[in-house]
Image (cartoon, coloured by chain):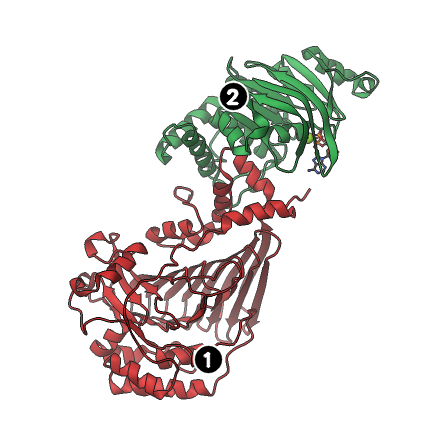
């Protein structure tokens, strides 16, 4: 589904990613771990098409399409979703309206019929019921005055509504209380399917206990320094990252 | 990390705000034009064209006399080349037969003009519940739903007709809110005003329709000097909306209007403006100079006047809709969105003067600046000695798009009664690349993202607009806000 080859990217001539390789197949859950500043968020933002980052080398294909040639909205329409590490506030626009606009924009681009306010409200109610959350965030302005945890949950709610093929979660578990981590993980699990893949950036084992990733990667200095199964995360939890610094990068 | 200063990002954002002016075409119609320049003879000519009674002419001449002794104000935070008042035509009217009995007699070109502007004049085509007066250059060309309104005793007429048909009402209230000598532009308007609307809502009547006037400047080198007077008697309610546009011309044209509102005991007037005069081109050439005096008198107890404005056009806007809160427990409100782009300059705000006891005022101002424009909010809140327990809430928010524009806020507060409670809040924000990216990541186009962000910013004002016009306002900013209010 996603094929990243030798990806180099940076800002103002400073390289942040230097040669990332990663393949994600439909149905898989990948965890990406790594020290602060190793480039995890940069990778996530580059995949989503943030204009700040310059791609200097490498290729990324998503469902056979050249992802790097597509604008950020086109990537969303193609089924790529990013749950932001720092979700952005939009004043005066309710969460519900924002989601409806986003969904209709995607539907329109895919040649599907747009949903009117009533149909959308129905769909939203269904989704909320499915993940067992109340509608208290729906009528508030997008992320405005939300607590850190509410912002993260809101990202997952958007994911649930937009039903992407590939979801990249950038530290969605950071700042969540213990119950909220479980609740977010359960929501993610509910949307797992053979057609859908997840890339989960995290510092903590806790969320991985619920998600049981198929693959775990360690990003270090802009490269995938080590890959393994779910045991790798446990090993990292016990040993930290230092021991990896001596090993040569893979790929 | 602040990425907002990235010049390429702001250039991309600017592009979306810079939509071409859609109302810039002109109508090819022969007009009856007064010679250029201003003197007593021109004023007599205007008065004669309008078949005015003698007192009206006297009134104009007195205003003119005073105007000659007055100086153009220069204190606003705006700059422009001096206006040559002798180079302007003070009267321009589409040539047509004297008196129109029905819409069938209106020149089809005029009907077409207003249709093109989205203002159909045939009653059956109108938005239900909206009566329209259409003013083309110096004259009113059609007023719809007159009969329907008359059933309720509501008078809605071009002011020139009202002067002839209801002289006692006009004479009683004209200049009672904005005196002839109030300021330079008000004096000029009093001398040469040509058309505008007159509204009278009798005691206890809730006006069954939205009233609206659409102003169109067409002829070259003309000024538009309209005068609007709205009187709401005891316990009556009325909602009035004005819209404006003009062709694209490379000269600057002057629009100096006066609007007077009078609300008696328990009366409510809601006055909304969607101003979309031609703003000039990207280089700052051409555009309308919009110098307007708008003032409402809450003369009665429990009366309420509320101004809502969406200002997107004009090269220069100079305008401060005000409320004189004379009646005890009266309420004044001001909701404003002012958008400036390219070289536009807007100096706008409000004045709330609290005189009665327990008077309340609310000011919500949203300034959006893009390009190299300058957007200034100037507000004055004055609490007079006798105004026990007066309250004011002011909120002034500025949004910057790009980094070459400016936003300025000047609140003036003058409190002479210690029981007053005043609250003031001000914010400045930028449309950031990260906000746009966030929206795009959810599937919205860049253009829709900017519109969404700007509309969200203006929401507190848009929700004050009558339903039919909220749509027009959001469209003016390039998007539909349907469904987001809640
Ligand atoms: N837009 C930018 N401008 C300048 N430097 C940047 C930018 N984005 C990322 N960087 C730098 O690139 C490096 C990687 O940052 P990134 O946010 O990708 O790290 P991360 O792995 O997500 O870290 P964390 O675990 O703390 O979230 C850091 O040194 C960061 O300062
Ligand atoms: Mg990060």
Q: Residue at 52% across / 33% down in the picture?
A: A73
The answer to which quarter of the image holds residue B358 is bottom left
Q: Residue at 56% across / 72% down in the picture?
A: B414
Q: Residue at 20% across / 61% down in the picture?
A: B145
- Residue B199 seen: no
Q: Tell me the tag on residue B170.
A: none
- Asked if badge 1 and badge 2 are on a common chain, one would say no
Name the spot of residue B277 as percent of width and height, x first. 41, 62
Question: Against B30, is A242 above or below?
Answer: above
Tell me, by letter, which chain the rendering colours red. B
Question: Against A230, is B66 above or below?
Answer: below
Tell me, by letter, which chain the rendering colours green. A
Q: Quadrant of the C terminus of chain B?
A: top left
Name the spot of residue B199 as percent of width and height, x first. 28, 69
Q: Residue furthest right?
A: A246
Q: Quadrant of the N terminus of chain B?
A: top right
Name the spot of residue A66 as percent of width and height, x first. 57, 24
**Is residue B317 found left or right of A68 in the rendered image?**
left
**Is residue B421 found left or right of A30 in the rendered image?**
left
The answer to which quarter of the image holds residue B266 is bottom left
Badge 2: chain ID: A
Badge 1: chain ID: B
Name the spot of residue B3 as percent of width and height, x first. 65, 43
Residue under label 1: B184
Please name whichever residue, A85 or B353, is drawn nearer the observer in this view of the structure.
A85
**At numbered mark 2, what does the secondary structure look like: helix, strand or loop?**
loop
Please name whichever residue, B356 or A126, is drawn nearer the observer in this view of the structure.
A126
- Residue B268 seen: yes
**Is residue A16 found left or right of B152 in the rendered image?**
right
Residue under label 2: A165
Q: Residues within 10 Å of mark 2 (few under 14, many from 20)?
A: many
């Amino acid at each position: 589904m996603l094929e990243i080859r030798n990806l180099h990217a940076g800002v103002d001539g400073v390289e942040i990613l230097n040669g990332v390789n990663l393949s994600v197949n439909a149905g898989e859950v990948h965890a990406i771990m790594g020290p602060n500043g190793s480039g995890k968020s940069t990778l996530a933002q580059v995949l989503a098409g943030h204009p700040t980052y310059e791609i200097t080398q490498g290729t990324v294909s998503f469902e056979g399409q050249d992802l790097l040639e597509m604008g950020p909205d086109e990537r969303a329409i193609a089924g790529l979703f990013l749950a932001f590490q720092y979700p952005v506030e939009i004043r005066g626009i309710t969460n519900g309206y924002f989601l409806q606009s986003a969904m209709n924009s995607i539907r329109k681009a895919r040649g599907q019929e747009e949903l009117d306010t009533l149909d959308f409200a129905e769909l939203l109610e269904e989704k909320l019921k499915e993940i067992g959350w109340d509608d208290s965030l729906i009528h508030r302005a997008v992320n405005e005055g939300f607590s850190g945890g509410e912002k993260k949950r809101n990202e997952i709610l958007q994911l649930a509504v937009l039903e992407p093929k590939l979801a990249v979660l950038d530290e969605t578990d950071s700042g969540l209380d213990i119950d909220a981590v479980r609740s977010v993980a359960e929501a993610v699990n509910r949307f797992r399917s053979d057609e859908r893949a997840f890339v989960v950036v995290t510092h903590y084992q806790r969320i991985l206990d619920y998600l049981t990733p198929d693959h775990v990667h360690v990003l270090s200095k802009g490269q995938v320094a080590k890959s393994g199964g779910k045991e790798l995360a446990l090993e990292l939890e016990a040993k930290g990252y230092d021991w990896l610094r001596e090993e040569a990068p893979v790929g | 990390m602040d990425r907002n200063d990235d010049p390429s990002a702001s250039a991309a954002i600017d592009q979306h705000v810079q939509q071409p002016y859609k109302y810039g075409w002109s109508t090819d119609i022969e007009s009856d034009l007064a010679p250029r320049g201003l003197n007593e003879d021109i004023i007599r000519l205007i008065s004669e064209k309008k078949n005015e009674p003698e007192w009206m002419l006297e009134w104009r001449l007195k205003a003119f006399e005073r105007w000659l002794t007055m100086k153009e104000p220069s204190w606003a935070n705006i700059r422009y080349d001096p206006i040559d008042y002798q180079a302007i035509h003070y009267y321009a009217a589409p040539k047509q037969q004297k008196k129109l009995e029905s819409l069938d007699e209106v020149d089809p070109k005029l009907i077409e003009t207003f249709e093109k502007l989205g203002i159909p004049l045939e009653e059956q085509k109108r938005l239900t519940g909206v009566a329209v007066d259409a003013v083309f250059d110096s004259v009113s060309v059609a007023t719809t739903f007159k009969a329907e309104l008359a059933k309720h005793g509501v008078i809605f007429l071009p002011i020139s007709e009202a002067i002839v048909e209801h002289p006692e009402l006009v004479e009683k209230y004209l200049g009672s809110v904005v005196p002839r000598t109030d300021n330079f532009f008000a004096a000029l308007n009093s001398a040469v005003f040509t058309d505008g609307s007159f509204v009278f809502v009798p005691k206890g009547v809730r006006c069954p329709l939205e009233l609206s006037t659409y102003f169109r400047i067409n002829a070259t080198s003309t000024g538009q000097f309209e005068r609007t007077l709205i009187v709401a008697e005891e316990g009556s309610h009325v909602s009035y909306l004005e819209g404006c546009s003009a062709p694209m011309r490379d000269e600057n044209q002057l629009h100096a209007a006066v609007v007077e509102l009078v609300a008696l005991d328990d009366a409510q007037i809601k006055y909304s403006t969607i101003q979309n005069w031609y703003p000039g081109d990207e280089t700052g050439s051409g555009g309308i100079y919009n110098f307007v005096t708008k003032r409402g008198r809450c003369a009665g107890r429990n009366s309420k006047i509320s101004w809502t404005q969406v200002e997107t056009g004009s090269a220069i806007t100079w305008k401060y809709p005000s409320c004189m809160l004379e009646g005890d427990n009266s309420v004044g409100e001001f909701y404003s969105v002012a958008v400036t782009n390219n070289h536009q300059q807007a100096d706008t705000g409000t004045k709330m003067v609290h005189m009665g006891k327990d008077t309340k005022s609310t000011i919500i101002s949203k300034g959006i600046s893009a390009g190299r424009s300058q957007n200034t909010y100037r507000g004055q809140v004055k609490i007079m000695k006798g105004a026990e327990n007066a309250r004011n809430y002011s909120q002034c928010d500025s949004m910057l798009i790009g980094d070459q524009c400016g936003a300025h806020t000047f609140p003036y507060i003058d409190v002479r009664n210690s029981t007053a409670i005043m609250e003031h809040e001000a914010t400045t924000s930028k449309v950031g690349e990260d906000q746009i990216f966030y929206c795009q990541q959810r599937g919205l186009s860049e253009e829709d993202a900017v519109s969404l962000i700007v509309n969200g910013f203006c929401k507190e004002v848009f929700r004050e607009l009558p339903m039919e016009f909220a749509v027009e306002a959001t469209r003016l900013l390039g998007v539909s806000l349907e469904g987001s209010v809640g």
